[in-house]
Amino acid sequence: MKVTVITAFPEFFRAFFETSIVGRAVERGLLEVDVVDLRDYGEGSYSKIDDYSFGGKGGMVLMAEPLALALEGLKGDPYVVYPSPQGVPLTQETVETLFSKGDVVIVCGHYEGIDERFVSSRVDLELSIGDYVLTGGELPAMVIIDAVSRLVPGVVGKGRSVEEDSFFKGMLDTPHFTRPSSWRGQDVPDVLLSGNDGAIEDWRRREAVRRTLERRPDLLSRSGLLGYMDKNAFL
Ligand code: ADE
């Protein structure tokens, strides 16, 4: 999997690409990353990359030409993503689609955004990470990269079986516990200490459904699991 970021703030990504799970994936060559400094493609002696918004209230907009030059400087034919609050919502399904592309470039906007002519002619997918407005696309880019890199084989260890994954897909996670088994008067559920794999599996599935039903019933109806639960008298 290869991910390239085009940004006016490359320093944002230094620690990210060197730390924790993503950092290890990069170090082990499981994830190829590149950060392109938009200023390298700026205009004139000041490397100008932005200008005032036409008809706007004084906000700055990243210009189309430096963005196009930065994109044209890349090898291959990457899938172009632009994080923006106007995009389609990022979901696990979108993350899987991006992973399947293999070669993805994320163009980070800043200030008021980027020139719409670049978006309409060069961007394959405009993606929002939620209904709130951030100061730029760098944090959303990291969110997207983090989620995609988890899917690269070997990045997060063995993971669950495919069968289990298909059951848990579209649901919230089960609760997790670690040592000690009793902490300040709160005990880990007995079943998790029982060593009975079947009973543990049943408990985990039940908890995943219960939590999802309680907190995010919209996910259950979307994934078709409500029908499954009816048929199996799950709760
Ligand atoms: N850029 C600014 N806010 C954003 C958001 N909510 N999602 C994606 N990109 C953004």
Image (cartoon, rainbow, N blue to C red):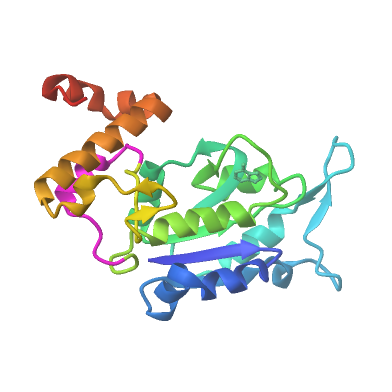
Q: Is residue 193 above or below residue 229?
A: below
**Quadrant assignment, res 72:** bottom right
156 sits left or right of 35 in the view? left
| Residue sitting farthest toward the front | 185
50 sits left or right of 81 in the view? right
| Residue sitting farthest toward the right | 58
The quarter of the image that holds ligand 1 is: top right
What is the quadrant of the N terminus in the image?
bottom left
Residue at the (63%, 57%) spot, across then down: 138
Q: Is residue 162 magenta?
A: yes
Residue at the (59%, 72%) spot, across then down: 15
Coordinates of residue 47 in the picture (x, y in percent): 80, 69
Residue at the (60%, 34%) spot, across then down: 131
Coordinates of residue 35 in the picture (x, y in percent): 58, 70
Q: Can residue 97 be seen in this view?
A: no
Q: Can residue 225 be seen in this view?
A: yes
29 sits left or right of 201 in the view? right
Q: Give the range drawn in magenta.
A: 157-172
Residue at the (82%, 64%) spot, across then down: 48
Q: In this view, does 218 lie above or below 172?
A: above
**Quadrant assignment, res 152:** bottom left
